[in-house]
Amino acid sequence: MRVNLLLALAPALLLFSCHSNPQENNSKTTSANVDTTTVKDRSNIKPASAQEILAKKEVPVLCYHQIRNWLPTDGKRAHDDIIAPDRFESHVKMLADSGYNSILPDQLYDYLVFDKKLPEKPIMFTFDDTDLDQFTIAAPTLKKYGFKGVYFIMTVAIGKKGRIAYMNKAQIKQLSDEGNTIASHTYDHKNFADFTAEDWKTQIEEPNKKLEDITGKKIEYFAYPYGVSKSSTLHKLKDYGFKAAFILSTQRDENYPLFTIRRIIDPGTYTAKNLYNSINKSFNKKPVSAK
């Protein structure tokens, strides 16, 4: 009964998407001098402290949900989370033409923790909620411009069809096999701040296992539904095998910056110029000084 109810509610939840925040790998044309492999042997490297991570320049991370044309039934607020395919491509093309290179979470982690060099003008593309159009439209568009992305999967939705269609297991596996990163976005989009003891199994442990079975790879990254984290339980994510987690555009946690990496939404109302200006405004701030 509970599962059926959740399945029925999942599409409705997605209409609000992660932007309804109650709180508000291979890179393109990478320089030959930049090593894009991840750090394998960390035994002789001292990990950066939280303050040292906060002092590093932030990498722009973009967040997307549905890649489709607006419908008359879409509310005004939903226009932020729904971007038309042609507009999405114009934004991706602008970033490619501007010299940006896509990176994946392992690269970002190694930069933040082990000071590994990134390609010039790094950027990360992330997609929430498992929507099918992320596979049929977003992934081919990124590939066209030499980019890869991160797909945060809400496992309750896998293979479901209806007013909103979602990716199936084979499509998720294909994205992973093509070098994109598959990551966790809970079972059914439950607010992280409201997790009970039972939720760590149903919202984290079981979804991770399912995604690992699909991809054959360890799930090490997480995006909070609605972008909402909770400082008192951030440490538990590490216990469940996560290396980092992503919020939206709220403030990073000073003790757990790896588990509060900022993203910004690329709204469906933005022009390519709007996005370019938003990236510069959001991620070119002066870093916090290390103590």
Image: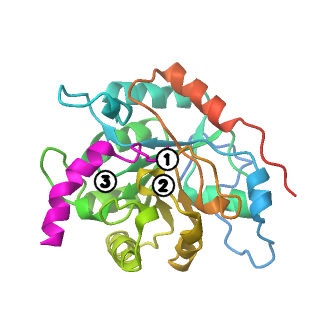
Residue 63 locus on image (x, y percent)? 46, 43
The residue located at (40%, 29%) in the rendering is 89
- 279 to 177, vertically: above or below: above
Callout 2 amino acid: Val
Closer-to-camera residue (283/35): 283
Q: Can residue 97 be seen in this view?
A: no
Callout 3 amino acid: Thr
First of labels 3, 2 by sequence position? 3
Residue 284 locus on image (x, y percent)? 71, 35
First of labels 1, 3 by sequence position? 1
Name the secondary structure under disc 3: loop
Query: Per the image, is 234 magenta?
Result: no
User: Which disc, if any, is residue 130?
Assistant: 3
Q: In this view, does 250 lie to the left or right of 167?
A: right
- Residue hosting label 1: 23
Q: Nearer the viewer, mark 1 or mark 3?
A: 1
- 8 to 234, vertically: above or below: above
Q: Quarter holding the N terminus?
A: bottom left
The residue located at (31%, 53%) in the rendering is 130
Residue 153 locus on image (x, y percent)? 35, 59
Magenta span? 1-24
- Characterize the local packing of mark 2: few (<14), some (14-19) or many (20 or more) Cα atoms within 10 angstroms: many
Query: Per the image, is 10 magenta?
Result: yes
Q: Quarter holding the C terminus?
A: bottom right
Q: Is residue 219 left or right of residue 136?
A: right
User: Which disc, if any, is residue 228?
Assistant: 2
Callout 1 amino acid: Gln
Q: Is residue 139 left or right of residue 6?
A: right
